[in-house]
Image (cartoon, rainbow, N blue to C red):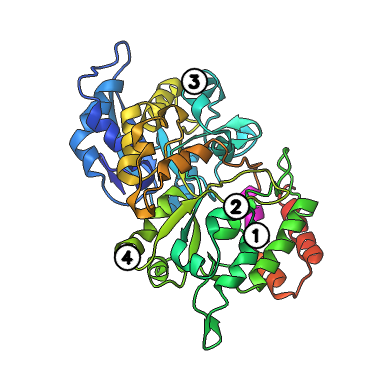
Amino acid sequence: MCMKKKMGMGLMAAAVLALAMLAGCGDQPGREYREVVMWTFGMGIDEWLLTHETDIEKRFNVDMVYELVPQNGFIQKLQAAMYSGENVPDIIEWMIENNRILNADPAKCFVLPLDEFVNKSKLWKQVPPGRSSWVTYGGHVYGLPHDVHPVILIYNDTLWKEAGVDLAEIETWDEFFAAALKLIAEKENGKPLHYALPSGDGGLGDSMWMIWQQTGAHILDREGRPQFNNFRFKMFLQKWLRWQESGVFTDWDWGNFGALLKNGTLCAYTSPDWWVGQVNAAVEDGAYEWRVRELPLYVGGNGARTSSWGGSFLAIPKTVKDPERIYEIIEYIQYGNPEILVSRYDIGGMLAPVAGIWDDPVFHQPDPRFGGQKLGELQTRHAMDTPRVNAGDVFWDAVADFNEVYPLLASGELSINEGLARVQETAEARLE
């Protein structure tokens, strides 16, 4: 479905506000006016874009056309367009997780490596290395991430303290899970009234995904080869399964998440910036006091007190004839206007990956939801330390391979050594 001036949600905040604030910039001299087509997988029409579309068009002397492409057909449509050479976009917005369009070999990649541009960019130098690692394959940077999405811990201070635990004093995840046994001690009909964390218990996803990043237990080595049988990952999996068996987790229920917080069933959760608002209904209810803090330390890990989850990036298909011009557009949309980046956080809570803006007062305001704690300070303090990952051609397939075997590990049908050997064999075969 093609539409003039429509925008996906992942890009929404930056581009929208950019359009509203660039009046009077004037056309770029010496550059031929042309149409620039951008594909996005997000849903909905951005009304700010519809209202202020002419601003960015004047700045870059272009006619911006946005096409909404369904997520489940995005890659297939892009591949078909590039093979046929017809109706290929100039820009794509795509998701970081399960992207499956990046490749360590630029000749095999759908999009252009941006190395020559980012190496000269002052703005790119402000992007946290951990965030850029998700779009770096074989040493090549292929996209500009939209946000940092740093992860913090949000918790029910009332119920934890009633259980005799001050979570602000907990230093490590080992201490957290030991203390969680006190939280779940109160039961009704044999089941705990309160739980420490949510988990889908499906492998590397939600809570496990975020904590895993703190371990330094990379599932690929620096050359992009699977290494599920490495000692660190085995130790993490052993510890994780023990935590699961302790009974401190409840389901990660997307549809009822806020309700579980409100009624006291769920007493803490690891949260990227885009999920913080799930606590709002519980705060408004007023039955409990809520607080935020950095993630507990994973002992023997990489030392990170945060993680990341989700997000999107902008990239340039390799068929584009004027990549330098298109790069200027995508860098401006993502990082180019400090006022836009600050407003993105002020309005939507999304933290832009440009460290130079983090001193703005908007990131240092007391948050009444958390007893006046400064949420923005907490997020920005740790954002530059988001863990790096070794991304690679088989990364997302390898994650899926592990998740397929995980239920057998959780049930005890396979030992950790047996399960990881199976995952390793399957993932290695993908390189052939």
Q: Is residue 115 magenta?
A: no
| Label 2 Cα neighbours within 10 Å, binned few <14 / some 14-19 / many ≥20 | many
Marks 4/2 in contact by CB < 8 Å: the verdict is no
Give the camera-side residue of 289 and 105: 289
Q: Secondary structure at mark 4?
A: loop
Q: Secondary structure at mark 2?
A: loop
- Tell me the mark number nearer the camera, choosing from 3 and 2: 2
Q: Which residue is mark 4?
A: 286
User: Alpha-carbon distance for marks 2 and 1?
Assistant: 9 Å
Q: Which mark is residue 121?
A: 3
User: Alpha-carbon distance for marks 3 and 4?
Assistant: 47 Å
Q: Position of residue 376 (x, y in %)?
A: 41, 41
Q: Which residue is mark 1?
A: 175
Q: Amino acid at mark 3?
A: Ser
Residue drawn 25% across the image and 39% down it: 5
Q: Which residue is mark 2?
A: 296
- Tell me the mark number nearer the camera, choosing from 3 and 4: 4
Q: Amino acid at mark 2?
A: Pro
Q: Is residue 275 left or right of residue 136?
A: left
Residue drawn 52% across the image and 89% down it: 189
Q: Amino acid at mark 1?
A: Glu
